[in-house]
Image (cartoon, helix red, strand yellow):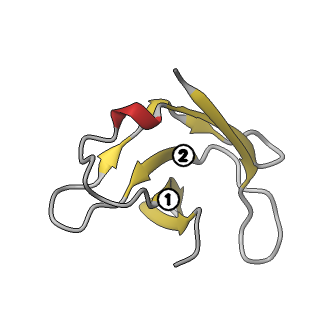
Amino acid sequence: MPQTFTGVVQFANGAPAANVTVHLFDADVITEDDDLTVEPGVSDGKGVFTVQYDPSRDLDFADVFRPYLQFNYMHHGEARSHQADLQPN
């Protein structure tokens, strides 16, 4: 059953970041990280986004659930990506 995560993405100076695509992943140690995203989020003019994800898409049942968000955006015409852990180590 899909769940949602809502947040705000901002630049380092506190300005809202619009048009940032957000995915939710589960980090894996041995295999490739699992993309749990059902519907990616896209931030609006205020930086607000909502991403839909499904925890049951985690394909490695033996590992520890370590979710993180991946932000994809353009900066001065160059594609950029940033990750943020949802649970501290």
Q: Label 1, on which residue?
A: 68
- For the point 83% across and 70% down, the residue is 14
Between the residue at mark 1 and the residue at mark 2, the CA separation in whole angstroms equals 10 Å
- For the point 35% across and 43% down, the residue is 35
Of labels 1 and 2, the one closer to you: 1
Of residues 21 and 69, which is closer to you in this image?
A: 69
Q: Label 2, on which residue?
A: 22
| Extreme residue toward the front, this view | 62
Q: Amino acid at mark 1?
A: Tyr
User: Is residue 46 shown above or below 89?
Assistant: above
Q: Position of residue 83 (x, y in %)?
A: 49, 65
- Along the horizontal axis of the image, is 5 left or right of 23? right
> Would you identify the image quadrant in which residue 19 lies?
top right
- For the point 44% across and 63% down, the residue is 80
Q: Amino acid at mark 2?
A: Val
Of residues 66 and 14, which is closer to you in this image?
A: 66
Of residues 2 and 48, which is closer to you in this image?
A: 2
